């Protein structure tokens, strides 16, 4: 299944190739203040292939917390947060915000609350390495 999505203004868009077709798509509603404020609910598929397109790179900002382990990609055009990435051992990993999904994939979402408070950096990085998307192609335009 090709799962696609984009921020409200379309500046940041993505397509995730999820094979075989999922019966359900796990979605984690993180309890941290950033995710709660932005109504972000994350999914990833470690065997998937993610294609990311950013039309106007100058409109994208990145938010990081004190541990600097993840970058939340924020569209300056509409304020949406469609993507979070982490560079682990020189490998980029990503998760996508299910609130940005388009089409039939939304009917397959199985949302669960998640609280990662107290998780140390090593455990967090290992969790992301196992569960996040590692095959990522990024097309960034400079307009």
Image (cartoon, rainbow, N blue to C red):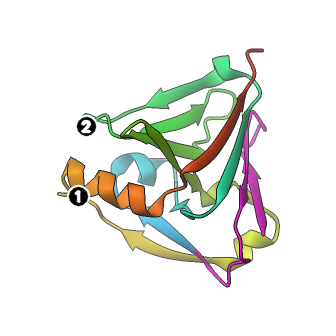
Residue at horizontal 41 percent and vertical 62 percent from the top: 130
User: Rounded to the nearest whole Å, what is the CA distance between mark 1 and mark 2?
Assistant: 13 Å
Location of the C terminus (image quadrant): top right
Q: Is residue 109 above or below residue 41?
A: below
Q: Is residue 131 above or below residue 40?
A: below
- Mark 2 neighbour class, 10 Å CA radius: few under 14, some 14 to 19, many 20 or more: few
Is 116 positioned to the left or the right of 12 in the image? Answer: left
Q: Which residue is mark 2?
A: 67
Magenta extent:
1-25
Q: Tell me residue 133's x, y (percent).
A: 55, 55
Residue at horizontal 21 percent and vertical 57 percent from the top: 119
Residue at horizontal 78 percent and vertical 70 percent from the top: 1
Magenta run includes residue 4: yes
Is 19 positioned to the left or the right of 65 in the image? Answer: right
Is 76 positioned to the left or the right of 140 in the image? Answer: left
Along the line of sight, the residue nearer the viewer: 61 or 78: 61
State the residue lying farthest toward the right: 103
Specify which label sits upstream in the sequence, 1 or 2: 2
Along the line of sight, the residue nearer the viewer: 34 or 105: 105
Tell me the number on the disc at residue 117. Answer: 1
Magenta run includes residue 14: yes
- Mark 1 neighbour class, 10 Å CA radius: few under 14, some 14 to 19, many 20 or more: few
């Amino acid at each position: 299944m090709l799962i696609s999505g984009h921020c409200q203004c379309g500046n940041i868009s993505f397509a995730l190739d999820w094979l075989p077709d999922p019966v359900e798509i796990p979605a984690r509603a993180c309890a941290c203040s950033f995710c709660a404020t932005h109504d972000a609910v994350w999914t990833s598929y470690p065997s998937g292939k993610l294609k990311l397109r950013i039309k106007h790179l100058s409109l994208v900002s990145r938010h990081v917390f004190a541990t600097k382990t993840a970058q939340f990609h924020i569209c300056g055009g509409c304020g949406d947060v469609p993507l979070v990435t982490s560079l682990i051992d020189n490998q980029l990993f990503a998760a996508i915000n299910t609130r940005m999904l388009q089409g039939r994939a939304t009917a397959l979402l199985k949302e669960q609350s998640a609280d990662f408070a107290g998780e140390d950096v090593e455990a967090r990085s290992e969790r992301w390495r196992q569960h996040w998307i590692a095959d990522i192609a990024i097309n960034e335009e400079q307009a």
